[in-house]
Image (spheres, grey):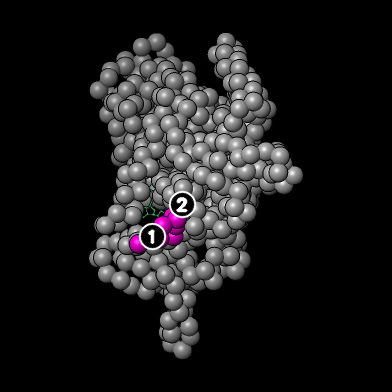
Amino acid sequence: MVISSLADSLVRGVETIGDSVSETFFEPVIRLGVTGLARSGKTVFITSLVANLLDRGRMTGLVAQQEGRINAAYLQPQPDDTVPRFDYESHMSDLTGPEPHWPDSTRAVSELRLSFKARPAGLLAGLQGPRTVHLDIVDYPGEWLLDLALLEKSYEDWSQETLSRIEKRTEAAEFLAQARAADPASVHDEPTAQALAAAFSTYLNKAREAGFYDCTPGRFLLPGDLAGSPVLTFAPLPISDPSRRRTLQREMERRYEAYKSKVVKPFFRDHFSRIDRQVVLVDALGAIHKGPQAVEDMRRAMADILSAFRPGRNAWLSQLLLGKRVERILFAATKADHLHHLQHPRLTAIMEALTREARDRASFAGAETAALSMASLRATTEEMRSHNGSELPCVRGTLLDSGKQAAFYPGELPDDPAHLLAPARNGADTWLGEDYGFMAFAPAHLTLRPGDGPPHIRLDRAAQFLIGDRL
Ligand SMILES: Nc1nc2c(ncn2[C@@H]2O[C@H](COP(=O)(O)OP(=O)(O)OP(=O)(O)O)[C@@H](O)[C@H]2O)c(=O)[nH]1
Ligand SMILES: [Mg+2]
């Protein structure tokens, strides 16, 4: 235990020195982490961000662009040879090809390097020519951050906590029946372990479908090339005694520990610890549409996700980071093109409130934070429609299922976010009064002018906050 954490921090130490040497003498590198829970909009965000940084006609909110200091931006081979490359070109052709469609779900961490030639701002501008700044964008599932909490839990504690948390969920009924019928003290046999793990991951998938966000261990939902391996073949069991050799319980415990050391820790060590700037994407509108329970659940998941950015709370992580901190964190409500812009300030307020508790408790010591609502790829236009004598602010777009054009009024978000968050926290089943509709729109057919990236809402402001100061 001691040896492994020592080794981790040594690696980190050497890397930090390496990074700062190359930053001073060579070319600065910004590592931007992009995360969010499943379907929050990570892939579309990165694709549109890169497209709009390559063709910056719609990026007037990026100060370096406004000041004409960016001479060029281009894609380059990334520095990490073992991480899959973010498949920018296919995602871009999905979104902007002749039959535009949303990209498929992604299942693992990926990376892309974009480099800028930019002239420095201010006094230095006259003295220095353009310099190269590298932006490494790292895409990883938010669920993986939730796993940080496992590091401090024994198998027994995790089992107890998980079983009591999911006790009343109908999605868990089948798994619970199976777990209760299992005898942890029986001799381990692989088919039983596999059946339990399969039932548990079926539950996790159903729970996520139903709008629960506390679906950990994260890799059960996104197994990638670990599918079927022992590190993913465990499940919580109702246990009361310490485990004995060769029992089901002992084997489950061993695999749970292996998951922590072989899956969770490497992710934090190899990816998370190197991030400088972070954007956390949140599909707040989607949760509001699903109902109060989904909103409350999302608020809790956000608080848990954000605890990874306050490493003081986790001894292992603090050791690993050695004081290195994420410098800026942006909380972005995505898909704001489902709302007329009149409602955007309200969505931002909800976003702020959702992350409020986490931010207050936090002080992300040293990290600057901001919240905004945005759309990475705008799929709608706005229009006012009269309805029963009043004017409703609507959005119009192509419906995803029928392919037909339609105008849509999603309901009025409250001025005060507490009107949503309080009933959610108090366990309400449905919203009182307002119904929040949600339409799925297809990406619009685009004809882009040379020099323009795809249309977006406030993607330039997001970019300015995240990297603007380094360009
Ligand atoms: N209207 C609109 N819809 C969006 C936007 N961004 C994402 N979406 C919708 O959200 C869905 C998920 O977006 P992705 O970018 O694939 O989300 P993700 O976080 O990468 O999802 P996973 O890879 O499954 O975790 C898309 O299929 C779209 O339906 C946007 O800017 N506008
Ligand atoms: Mg994705």
Q: Position of residue 283 (x, y in %)?
A: 46, 53
The residue shown at (43%, 85%) is: 386
Identify the residue shown where x is 71% and y is 39%.
127
Mark 2 is on which residue type? Asp
Q: Nearer the viewer, residue 138 or 64?
A: 64
The residue drawn where x is 35% and y is 61% is: 446
Give the left or right position of residue 88, taking residue 283 as reference: left
Q: Is residue 460 above or below residue 169?
A: below
Residue 453 falls within the magenta-colored stretch: yes
Q: Do the numbered discs 2 and 1 sit on residues whose CB atoms are within 8 Å?
A: yes
| Residue beneath disc 2 | 55
Q: Nearer the viewer, residue 223 or 272?
A: 272
Task: Tell me where the magenta segment starts and ends, as one range.
Answer: 447-455
How many labels sit on residues?
A: 2
Q: Residue at x 58, y 65 (%)?
A: 345
Q: Is residue 69 above or below residue 237?
A: below
Real-space Cα distance between discs 2 and 1? 10 Å
Give residue 9's position: percent from left, percent from top: 60, 18
Give the image location of residue 461, x and y in percent.
57, 55
Q: Quadrant of residue 123?
A: top right
Q: Is residue 63 above or below residue 106?
A: below
- Crowd tier of the residue under label 1, counting other residues whose Cα lies within 10 Å: few below 14, some 14–19, many 20 or above: few
Quarter location, residue 190 = top left
> Against 320, is 342 above or below?
below
Give the left or right position of residue 412, taking residue 211 as reference: right
Please say whether residue 112 is visible from this viewpoint: yes
Quarter of the image with the N terminus is top right
Q: Position of residue 380 (x, y in %)?
A: 40, 66
Secondary structure of residue under mark 1: loop
Q: Which quadrant of the rendered structure holds the C terminus? A: top right
Could you say which is closer to the camera, residue 376 or residue 193?
376
Residue farthest to the right, as pictured: 123
